Image (cartoon, grey):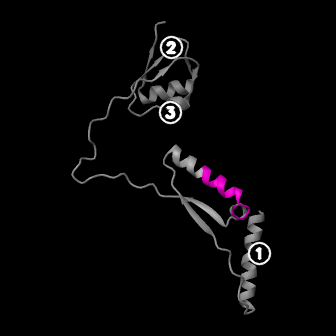
Amino acid sequence: MDDLRGLIRQILTEELAELRGESPAPRPQIREETVTLRSNADLQAFVQRILSLAQDGKARAEIEAGRHVFRLGAEPAPRMDAHQPAVTSPAAPPAAVRFDRGLVGEREVAALPDTQKSIRAAKSVRFTPLARDELRRRGIKIERDKT
């Protein structure tokens, strides 16, 4: 709410100064930094950058005041040569998914790849009713261990 009030105050000050014929106060420059996060290494580098900026009092104040902002960069399209087919090989069969113990919920089932057709489960593994419904809906079979 304070941000909104500050913004309204700033706009009113600029408009009133313009009506009086005064030159409006210069707007603070906003510094934008584009960040591309494609891997854990990119994320770690970004965190290190933030930590180094936080050590500088002026830079830290600019970040806190919103004068230094970070924007996510656009993810570049994957490179594809014109002479190569879009799909180089048929889809590999999904890796075997195995649940050894505990309770399997709907989230775990939803995280399975769409191509998954069966899962293995130990005898002690239990499934929630929603997980069972999701497995049934997706046509995934449960293969139980004998021991």
Q: Secondary structure at mark 2?
A: loop
Q: Looking at this view, is 14 or 68 the one in front? A: 68
* First in sequence: mark 1 vs mark 3: 1
Quote the CA–CA distance across marks 1 and 2. 64 Å
* First in sequence: mark 1 vs mark 2: 1
User: Relative to 125, is 64 above or below?
Assistant: below
Q: Secondary structure at mark 1?
A: helix
Q: Is residue 50 magenta?
A: yes
The amino acid type, in three-letter code, at marker 3 is Ala
- Residue that appears at 43% across and 30% down: 138
Residue indicated by mark 2: 122
Q: Position of residue 106 (x, y in %)?
A: 55, 30
Q: Position of residue 92 (x, y in %)?
A: 32, 31
Q: Is residue 140 magenta?
A: no
The amino acid type, in three-letter code, at marker 2 is Ala
Q: Looking at this view, is 49 or 137 the one in front? A: 49
Q: Looking at this view, is 84 or 58 the one in front? A: 58
- Residue that appears at 72% across and 93% down: 21
* First in sequence: mark 3 vs mark 2: 3
Furthest-top residue in this view: 147
Comparing labels 1 and 3, the label whose residue is closer to the camera: 1
The magenta stretch is 47-59
Magenta-drawn stretch, dominant element (helix, strand or loop) = helix
Around disc 3, counting alpha carbons within 10 Å, would you say few (fewer than 14), some (14 to 19), or many (20 or more)? few
Residue indicated by mark 1: 9
The reply to whether the C-beta atoms of the residues labelled 1 and 3 are less than 8 Å apart is no
Residue indicated by mark 3: 110
